[in-house]
Image (cartoon, rainbow, N blue to C red):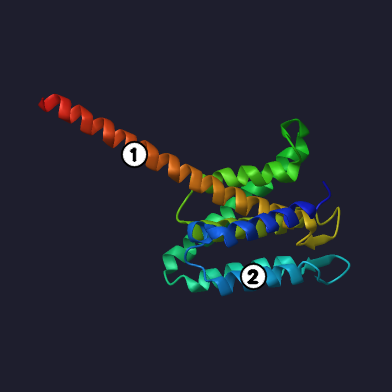
Amino acid sequence: MNPGYLSLILICITLIMLASGWKEVFLRHVSHKEILLFFMLWLIGSQLKFGQGLLEVNGSFIVGLALCVYACIKVNSPLMQMYMVVSGVLLGMVYMLLLELFATDPVFIIWNAGWDAALGMSLLAVLMRRGNTIQMVSVAIGVLVGDFGHHLLHRSEAPISLGSAIFQDTWWLVLITVSIASQLLQSILVGVKFITNRVSALRSRGTKE
C-alpha cells in the first residue's frame, strides 16, 4: 500500500465511528465543532507544503502541533500538562528507538518498519493509560516528536520532511489503535473485576451457610 492511503482509510473509519455514536466513548469532552474544525484543517493542511530544500513541512504536521498546543492549554492543571508533554516525549523516543532498531536489524520487522514502530508505541501508550483525552494528546505529541527526531537524526542523508504521507499514516494508525485497545482493555478489566467480586460474594455466602 502506498504511503498516504492508509491515513485516508482510517480517516473514513474514524468519521463513521464518530457519526455512529462512538464520540461519547472516545472523545467525550471534545465538542462537535472542535472535531469538525480539526478534520477540516487536517484535510486542507495535508495538501499544503511549506519550505523547500533542506526543510519541508506539510500542513498536517502544523495542524497536529496546533492541536497538541491547544489541548495542553485547555487543560487547567499544570501537573497534567507536564504529564502529557513528558509522556508524549517518552513515546516519541520509543518510536525513534524502534525505527532505528528496525533499520539496524530488519529481522525484527513484521509488516514494515513504520507500522511496527507505531504499533509498538501504541502498546506502550495503552499501558500508560491515564484517561482518553490525555492519552490521545500524549500519543499525538509522541508521533510529532518521533517524526521530527527521526528526520533530525538522518538529516545528513536526506532533507527534513515533516508531515509526510508516512507521518499521516502513523498518526491515524496510532490514534485509532490506542483508542480501540484502551477501550478493550478497560472492558476486560471491568469484566474481571465483576467476576472477582461475584466469586467473592458467592464464597462469602457459602461460608455463612
* Number of numbered tags placed on the structure image: 2
Would residue 129 appear left or right of 39 to someone viewing this image?
left
Q: Determine whether the residue tagged by mark 2 lies in a helix, strand or loop.
A: helix
Within 10 Å of disc 1 (Cα), the crowding (few <14, some 14-19, many 20+) is few
Q: Position of residue 174 (x, y in %)?
A: 63, 51
In the displayed structure, 114 sits above or below 37; it is: above
Name which residue type carries label 2. Phe
Q: Is residue 83 visible?
A: yes
Residue indicated by mark 1: 193
Q: CA distance from mark 2 to mark 1?
A: 37 Å
Q: In front here: 98 or 172? A: 172
Q: Quadrant of residue 144?
A: bottom right
- Compared to residue 57, the image places residue 93 above or below, namely above
Q: Amino acid at mark 1?
A: Lys
Considering the image in quadrants, where does the C terminus appear?
top left
Residue at the image position 58 percent from the left and 55 percent from the top: 139
Residue at 33% over, 34% down: 195
- Residue 129: give x, y in percent of width and height: 47, 50
Mark 2 or mark 1, earlier in chain:
2
Where disc 1 sits, the SS reads helix
* Picture residue at 37% right of the left edge, 36% below the top: 192
Image location (x, y in percent) of residue 33 = 57, 74
x and y, in percent, of residue 74 in the image:
49, 73
Residue at the extreme left: 208
Residue at image mark 2: 38
Q: Which mark is residue 70?
A: none
Q: Is residue 94 above or below residue 87?
A: above
Q: Are marks 2 and 1 in contact (CB under 8 Å)?
A: no
* The one of 135 and 202 positioned closer to us in this rendering: 202
In the image, 89: left or right of 202? right
Looking at the picture, does residue 88 appear above or below residue 39? above
Q: Nearer the viewer, residue 147 or 154?
A: 147
